Structure formats: C-alpha cells, structure tokens
Amino acid sequence: NAGVMQNPRHLVRRRGQEARLRCSPMKGHSHVYWYRQLPEEGLKFMVYLQKENIIDESGMPKERFSAEFPKEGPSILRIQQVVRGDSAAYFCASSPSRGARGEYNEQFFGPGTRLTVL
Amino acid sequence: QQQVKQSPQSLIVQKGGISIINCAYENTAFDYFPWYQQFPGKGPALLIAIRPDVSEKKEGRFTISFNKSAKQFSLHIMDSQPGDSATYFCAASRTNAGGTSYGKLTFGQGTILTVHP
C-alpha cells in the first residue's frame, strides 16, 4: 500500500507565477489535510477536504490560495501570484473515513513539496 | 485558545540517556495528542499518541505522560540512540464527531533532538 504521494517534491517559481501542488492520498483514504511549514517553525493547518467538499478552510489565507479534492484525481493546492513569503514546505496528510462509531483515524503525512519563490 | 507550546527548542542528549520534551495546550476541547518525528527533508511520521482518559502510554522506548488538570503532556525517549536524532513535534486535535473542525492538528513549534554517540 503506497503512502501519501506529493508532487512535485521541489518547485521553484518567480514572483507573480502560479504554483500547483498535488497530493494523492493513501488508497482508501477520503480525508485530506494540507499544512504549511515555514523554516524553523512547526506545521500550520491550512485546509481540510473530503471528496468534492471543503470541510474547513480556516487556515487558508483569504487571497491567492485555493484547494480542491475532486471526485477523481489528486487534491490540488493552488497558489496564485506567489510572493517570497509563500516559500515553505507544504505537507499533505490523509486519513481514512471515520470508524463505524465515529472514532478518529490517524493522519499519514506525505514527503512534502518545498516551494521556493525567487 | 488554539495554541500548543513546546519546549525545549533544542535538546542534546548522550547515547543511552533519557530525552524529555514537554508540551502545554490551552483548548480543553482537545482530546487527541500525538507526537510526530521528522527527519530532514521528510514528512512527519506518527510516533505515539494518547487520549486524555489515560495518564500514560508506552510503546517500546517511547512514553507519553499526560496531565489533564495541568493541560500538559510530555514525550520521554528512554535509552536514546543517535538514530533518534530528529525534530519532534507534539500536536493536539479535537476529534469528537460533532462539529466540522474536528481532525485538524495544531502543532507545537518543534524540538530538535541531537543524540551524541
């Protein structure tokens, strides 16, 4: 069973360009979370998605950032008109659907995409 | 109310020693407390996790101690090895089925652990 896959692993963009980060969850997982890690800092929650639905986007910047998790294909985190402050590692995590009694299932993290904005 | 504070920022331990990392949280709605290990260039990997209905959980050399009244929890690594050298993150989450914010993890700032041979 392959783990969470993210691509590209490294992405370099110039200011003003668009960045698209892709995340393929583990097989059978229908919950996807995106986190951002700035240099020398912990991970910060950005958005939580299920198939075709954004459940919680309270951590997403109000402008330039968007995320989707379509019925088919990977989850996409899109950053428009990137600025130097967007340089960070972006991690995706997935978890399976809740258990029959609503119990929580742990999140499995991908290797991350390291975005550098020149 | 969503913060998780972690200390120390860095820790140096001799091989065979005990590494102790502490975390404190504010939000009493949190009910799931995992610890993650991250190596350079890699994603975080779950080490061990605890829920507030127990005060301690042990898995191999790793133990979580949990103090609900003090809103604190800690990771103990016994017989620390050079291979344990990594960044460790504590986290907290609200996982009850009600509400839409459940599941997202709030992370501490991280502790860089170095174990000297």
Image (spheres, grey):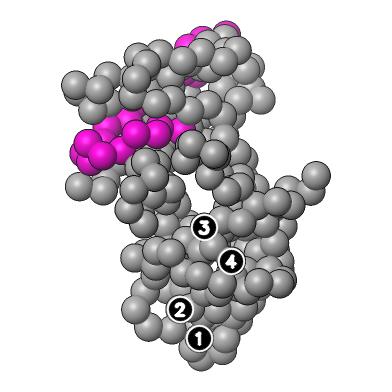
Front residue of A87/B89: it is B89
- Residue tagged 1: A80
- Residue tagged 2: A65
* Boundaries of the magenta span: B13-34
What amino acid is labelled 3 in the image?
Answer: Tyr
User: What numbered label is drawn on residue A51?
Assistant: 4
Disc 2/disc 4 C-alpha distance (Å): 18 Å
Marks 2, 3 in one chain: yes
Circle 1/circle 3 CB separation < 8 Å: no
Residue A37 in view (yes/no): yes
Which mark's residue is nearer the viewer, 4 or 3? 4
Disc 4/disc 3 C-alpha distance (Å): 12 Å
- Residue tagged 3: A33
Q: Position of residue A27 (x, y in %)?
A: 74, 52
Circle 1/circle 2 CB separation < 8 Å: yes
Marks 1, 4 in one chain: yes
